[in-house]
Structures are given as C-alpha cells and as structure tokens.
Image (cartoon, coloured by chain):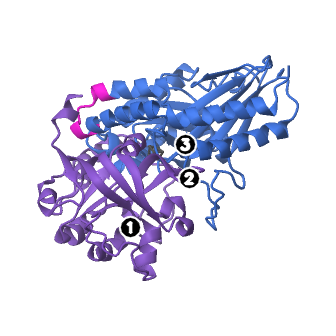
Chain colours: A blue, B purple
Amino acid sequence: MTITADHIEEAAYHIMKKAAIDIPDDYLTGIEAMADKETGDLSAFVLSAMLDNYRAATEDRRPMCADTGLPRYYVKIGDNADMKSMVALDAALRKATANATHDVPLRPNRVHPLWRTEHNNNLGINAPEVEWSFEPDADWIDITTVHKGGLFGSDYRMLFPGDGIDGIKRFLLDTLIAFGKRGLACQPAIVGVGIGGSKDTCMQLGKQAACLRVVGDRNPDPEIAKLEHEFKELGNSIGMGAMGFVGSSMVVDCHIEVGYTHTGGMPVSVHTFCLSSRRATARIHSSGEITYRTDPRWFTPYMRREGIT
Amino acid sequence: MSQAATRNTHHLKVPVSASDIAKLKPGDIVYLEGVVYTAREGVYDRVLGKGQSLPIPDLAPISNVNFHCSPAASQSDEGSYIIGGVTATASFRFSKWMESWLDLTGTKIVIGKGGMPKDDYANILAPRGAVYLTTVGYGTGALLGRGVVGVRDVFWLDDLGIAQAMWMFDVKAFGPFIVDSDLEGNSLFAQHNDAIADHINSLYDGLKPPALSRYGETDDRKDEVM
Ligand code: SF4
C-alpha cells in the first residue's frame, strides 16, 4: 500500500486538534513537580489554576489557550516510505490546517505582516511553515505539529568564542528576566538554546530544542547535558515564578542543540515554549496505519549527523 | 494546593457595585457573573478615535467590565457562535485610551493580560473608582471559555473581525482573575517586580563582561559597541 494524501490529511487534522487541546504528559508532569516545589504563594496559585485549565480543556475538548499560536509542521520522511507526491503531501497539510482552524476552533492568527489581511484559516504566504528532514532505514512519515504562542520570550545574539559559557549565561538571564517580568513569556517554559550554526540555523536549532524535545530528555553529549541542567537551575534561581510573581518556577526544562559554526563566532538563540506547550506527532506507516504520540523524536542520531564526518 | 485555597476570593455580580470594588485588594481572586464585554484597539479607535457612538448607548447598567480579549470563536452553519477558548491580550498597549473610555462608558473593572503601568492606576483608574484584574497563567483559555455561558450580542463583527469585534458574553463563575490594582492605586505586579529586582544584580556577579557590547544599551549615541 502507498501513503496517500488522504492519510496525511487525516493524520495532520488529528494532531492539530490534539495539540490545541491536550497538554503533553511530559510537560504536565513537569508542571506538577514545579507546583509541588513552588513556595511563592501567587506563583503556586497560577500553577494550580493552569493544572485546572489543562483538565478543563481535555474534558470539554476546547483549546487550552485561546491564543492558539502559529500552527506549523515538522515532517520526517523515512528513506523507504512508499509515497507518491511531495506536493500532494504539502497540500494535505494546508487543507488540514484550514479545516482544524474552523472545527476546533483555532484562532485565525495568521495575517499578512504589512496589510494585516487574513483568510480566516491560518494559511497564507509562507504559512504554515513546514520543515523537512529524512530518516534512513525507515518506511514511515512522521508529522509533528507545534502551536507555539508567545510574541515574547525568544531572542538571538552573536557572541564570540571569548564570551564562553559566561556569555551564554548572561544572555540567557537577560532574556528570561526581560520577558519573565509580568509573565510576558507565560512561564514556566521549556527553554531551548541554540548554539552555533549560521544565524538562521542557530534560531532554528534553539526553537527545535524548545519545541521538539520532551521534558526530561538530555543531549547525548554528557558535557552539554550538564549545561542543560545548570541553565535550568540558573533560570529557577532568578527569584521569579509564573506571571513574574516572586517564586522559583521559571524553567521546566532546558534543552541545548549545537551546530558547527564559524571559527570566529558563537551565535546563540534562546526560545521559550510557554505554559501552552502544544505539540503532537503522527506516524503514518507505509501500510497506511497511523499511530499518535506526543514525543516528536525529531533529534535522532541521524538528524544530528552524529558520528558522520 | 493549599496556597490556592487560602487566597481571599470574591464572587461578584456584574454590573459590579462600588462597595464590591472597594473590597478588592492586590492578590485577591475574583470570579464574575453577569455580562462582560470585550473592547480593544479596534473598538477604542472606532468610538474614541473616529467618534462613532457606542452600539449600546447605556452600557454600564448592562456591563461595567471591559475584557481585553480575542476569543477563539467560529460561527456554526446555523449562525450561532462557538466560543472555544478565551484568553486576554496584553493591556499596556491600550493605556492611552483608558481615561476617555472609562469616562464615556462608566466601566469599573478592566481585565487583561499583564497589567498596566502603575501610574495609570494612580492617575486614571483609581480616581474613577476602577480597578484592574489580570487573567491567570496566562493560558487559562479553557477555564475562561467554560465561564462563557452564552453570547448575548456581538457588534461590528463584519468590519472588525473575530479578534477585534465587541462581544457581549454572558458569564458565570468566570475566572479566576487576580486583582492587580486597588482604589489606592497599588499594583501587585509593581510590588513583585520590586521584590525581585533586589536579587537580579547578584545573578550576574562573577560573569565576565561581554566581548562585544550592544549599541543602544546606553543613551549615549556616541557609544561604540567595541
Ligand atoms: S504565550 Fe502561550 S500560554 Fe501565553 S497566551 Fe500565548 S499561547 Fe497562551
């Protein structure tokens, strides 16, 4: 059997709904653990209200947050996946986006950046974004959707080798404090830090680190894994909790992704995936069977090109 | 969670009375019942900028609660409205409209995301007997969506779109909201920012200075980034 555009559309529509409504388990468990530890009484109140909110969303089948973010896709195509048309795949993703926008409903957030015109369906020029990757020895297609909200909470800075880890910490603190006040970033967040690559890769790595790795996941490089832990502790020691109230709940987890970069530079990006950390994944097998999960498993060893020189 | 249970909580009827408003203290929790209307830049600009009259001439007896919000809504085939989630939008952007809006409409509670500048509370809201409540999280869209039991009316939907239209929601157990400002012009956000600020400098202690600074970090336009 072949993977058809209908399979893709069905899977994409399902994950659009699921992402908007059901908070992923890993993030939920992370917030529950933070709520237990939080000593700031207002910050603790906010977390307990959020836990009620996740329950209400799932029970009523309504979006957890009315700002349903910018829905987008990450597609991983197995090298042996039996599929005919890439263009049909892309078209199916667009159709699913428009249908889910009407049915869930999602807020039609997508507008032209200058004329502010909209089509009421979250489609437009270069929207939704679809990122493509490949996986050897696999006969499936993975489609992940992320509905990332937040006009606030992400930033980029060109640092230099001499800045070292101190420079990254300084930038991380600047970003978390600037956007954490009054809770503009809707923290506690999954913080993604992209280090290296060229500027655009750096942004992409940081965003994928925030949105496509689950709470508790560690980078395979043990030294980077240690840094992830250190950055998380640093964020939670600012003294700021949910909504910028006094507390400790700032970072649910921190994920770092790196890419080889220019010998003279060390570009860094910071991204925060908010209290509505919405992601869902579908795997479409070549048999036509579709399975669903919340861990995108995006960063495979092949994805990072580990050991490939 | 125990902390949640111990907070001072008010269940208020809308239109909200002056004596109810006087009871609210920063950090208290509020739930509303009655009618809440949405208005943000689209509506403000129409009425205050372009001088059009309000779609309801006598608004305050129906609702004196202005919610800075865009719902996740869609219209069913039969024409009724499906309100999925409801989430506030950042209020600081509407600061310039508040004075005339409160005078025109008699609004006594403004609800939104993130509060407004502290000076606005002291100079604009408090003297008019009005307070600011913030939504929680801010992602409590499902809880607030649950509190919207019906759409009583919607104005200017065709011209302004779903996000900017003036919605009149029938609400019940609508919340939770946290009181940010009171009638003395205090601000909960400002109090917490001050408390956190003391500690911020020490976080940077021992971190070496950046290799390259950033233009615009000081006010001196002769500065170089090197
Ligand atoms: S940042 Fe996240 S939780 Fe906050 S309003 Fe936007 S989507 Fe909702």
Q: Quadrant of residue A206?
A: top right
x and y, in percent, of residue A7 in the image: 76, 29
Q: Residue at x 47, y 71 (%)?
A: B222
State whether label 3 is within 8 Å of ligand 1: yes
Please name the residue that numbered disc 2 is placed on.
B75
Looking at numbered disc 3 in the image, what kind of residue is underneath it? Answer: Lys
Residue A291 makes an appearance in the image: yes
Mark 2 neighbour class, 10 Å CA radius: few under 14, some 14 to 19, many 20 or more: some
Question: Looking at the picture, does residue A272 appear above or below residue A36?
Answer: below
Please name the residue that numbered disc 3 is placed on.
A148
Please name the residue that numbered disc 1 is placed on.
B94
Which chain hosts label 3?
A
Nearest to the eye among marks 2 and 1: give it.
2
| Main secondary structure found in the magenta portion | helix
Query: Residue B183 — which label?
Result: none
State which region is magenta: A35-43
Mark 3 neighbour class, 10 Å CA radius: few under 14, some 14 to 19, many 20 or more: many
x and y, in percent, of residue A265 in the image: 62, 44
- Judged from the image, the secondary structure of the residue bearing numbered disc 1 is helix
How many angstroms separate mark 3 from mark 2 (CA)? 24 Å
How many angstroms separate mark 3 from mark 1 (CA)? 25 Å
Image quarter of the N terminus of chain A:
top right
